[in-house]
Image (cartoon, rainbow, N blue to C red):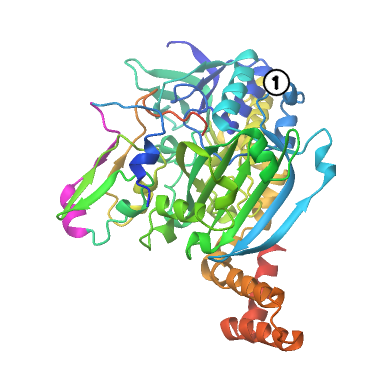
Amino acid sequence: MIKVEEKLFQNRYRVDADLPHIRVKDNTVCNDLCSTQQCTVCCPAGCWTFEAGKIGLMTDGCLECGACRVVCDEFKNVDWNYPRGGYGILFKFG
Amino acid sequence: MSEKFDVIIVGAGPAGNSAAYTLAKAGLRVLQLERGEYPGSKNVQGAILYASSLERIIPDFRETAPLERHIIEQRLWMMDEKSFIGTHYRSDDFNSEPYNRYTIIRARFDKWFSEQVQAAGALVICEMTVRALLRNEQGRVIGVEVEREDGKIYADAVILADGVNSLVATQAGLRKDIQAGNVALAVKEMIFLPKETIESRFNLAGQSGVVIEMLGSITEGMVGTGFLYTNKDSLAIGVGGMLSDMKAQKTTPVELLERMKAHPSIAPLIAGGETREYAAHLIPEGGYKALPQIYGDGWLLVGDSAGFVNSVHREGSNLAMETGRLAAETLIDLLQAGKEPSAVNLARYKARLDESFVMKDMKKYQNIPETLHKRRQFINDYPPLLNGAAHKFFTVDGQDKRSKEKEIIASFVKRRSLFGLLGDAYHLWRATR
C-alpha cells in the first residue's frame, strides 16, 4: 500500500515554518477524553497521528480541506485557520 | 489602504470571479482578495465546466479559456469488487459546437478567469488572507480586515466567495459551521499519460472527452461516489464520501483512492500513468435543507460558501458562477440606484435565486441527502445485486434462462424483501420527482 507521504511529495508547498495554521487547543482532550481520534483516519494528508497515547500534528503536508476541524465535532478541539497569504499548498492543477 | 470600494469580494474561485467580473463590467469599484499565490492555487474540483453559466457572463469564453476536452460521452458505473454494470451515453450531438460541457484544470482555468476579471477593471490582490469582517455600530458589514498592519479595507458591501469552509462568514457568525453530515470529503489525483494513449483507451478523437461517475463498492459502505475524467494529456481520478460516514470507519482517504485505482475495471485505464498531484477538498452536499441565510446587512454568500451544490447531477461550479452573477447584479441595481445594501434590499438576491435554476434544482433534490443517508441499500445492496444478476445472466453454463431469472429475482427479494424493493422504488421516486 502506497504511503501518503509519497503522494504529498508530488505536491508544491510553501511551508510557513514558524506558523502552523492548525493547532490542537488542548492536547489532554485528544489524549484522554477523545476515544476515536478520527482526525487520524479522515485527514487525507496523514497530518494527524496518535501514538503511545499522544496526539501528534504536522501541518506541512496539509491540503487545507478542513476535514479535521469538521470531524472534531464532539470536542471542537481543532483551532483551524488558513495559512498566511501565499503559504501552504499551492495546487499546480487543482 | 484608506481607499473605499463599492464591493469587496473574498475569494477568487468561480463564484468570486463571476461576481467580480460582473461588477467590474458595470463600472463599480471592485476589490477582490485571494489567499493563494495566484487564483486557482487553492482550488480543487473534478473538474467539469458546464458552459451555460459562464456563457452568460463571458459569451466568447471559448476563444481564450484553457479548456481540456469537450465531453461527448457520460458513463455511470455501479460497481462491486470485481465488476461494474452501467450506462454509457455517447452522442455526436455533443461533438458539434458550441459544446455543452468541458473538462478543465482548475488552477489554469481560475487563473484565466481572474485575468478576465482584472481586464474588466477589478483590483485583484493575491496572497492576502481575510481574517475578519468589519461592522459598523448597527452591525452592518462595512469591510474586511486582512493580515496586515492597518489591514482594514472598507466597502459598501462584501461578497463572501471564500469556499466550502467559509471561515470568514462562520467566524463572523453569519452562518453556522458546516456539519460532517452535510459535507463530503473527496480526494483526487492527476495522472498524466500521452494524449494518444488517452484517446485510444477511451475511444476518443481530437478534443473530445469522456467522463465516468461511479458508485458502489468503491466507497466501502459510505454514501459517496468516484469519478474518472479525461483531460488532454491527463486523467483526473477521485473518490469521496460523506464526512459523517468517513468518521465512522477506519479506511483513510488515501487507502480508498488506492483501492479504487486497483479495481480491475479502472486499473487498465490508468496503467502506466504518472501521478503529478494529490489533492483533497470538502464538497457541501447537504443540499437545500442545509443552506444557511445567504444575505444580510451589507453581505452576501455565493457558491460553496453557501453550499450551492447539486450533488445528484455533480454540478457545483456552474451554481457558483450563477450565484456570483446574481449577487453582483443585485448589488449593481441597488448601488446604481443609490440604494443601501441593507438586508431588506438584499432580499432581492434570494428572490433572483428562487427564480433561477439554482434554487429550483436545490429544492427538487432536497430529500436526496436524507434518503441516501437513511437508505444505504442504494449504495450497498443494489450495485452488487445488479452486478450479480448480470453475471448470472451472461454466463452460459447449461442452466436454462427461466431458472436463472428466478434465481436473480430471488436474490433481490432475499437481500431487500418484496416490501423493501417496493419501498426503495417509492422512496427513490419521491426523492427525485
The quarter of the picture where residue B312 lies is bottom right
In the rendered view, tell whether residue B155 sits above or below residue B181: above
Query: Would you call the spot at circle 1 few (<14 residues within 10 Å), some (14-19), or many (20 or more)?
Result: few
Question: Is residue B338 shown to the viewer in this render?
Answer: no
In the rendered view, tell whether residue B417 sits above or below residue B48: below
Left of B213 or right of it: where is B147? left
> In the current view of this chain or complex, which residue is farthest to the front?
B398
On the image, the x and y values in percent for residue B388 come to: 62, 74
The quarter of the picture where residue B203 lies is top right
Nearer the observer, B73 or B240: B73
Q: Residue at x 52, y 24 (%)?
A: B39
Q: Which residues are magenta?
A: A18-33
For label 1, the residue is B64
Q: Residue at x 39, y 43 (%)?
A: A66
Quarter of the image where the N terminus of chain B is located: top left
Question: Is residue B285 shown to the viewer in this render?
Answer: yes
Is residue A25 shown in magenta? yes
On the image, the x and y values in percent for residue A39 come to: 31, 51
On the image, the x and y values in percent for residue B130 come to: 41, 26
Is residue B363 shown in magenta? no
Q: Residue at x 60, y 68 (%)?
A: B383
Nearer the observer, B269 or B339: B269
Left of B246 or right of it: where is B55? right
- Amino acid at the residue labelled 1: Thr
Quarter of the image where the C terminus of chain B is located: bottom right
Q: Give the total number of marks visible in the rendering.
A: 1
On the image, the x and y values in percent for residue B83 come to: 60, 64
Nearer the observer, A70 or A8: A8
Letter of the chain that mark 1 sits on in the rendering: B
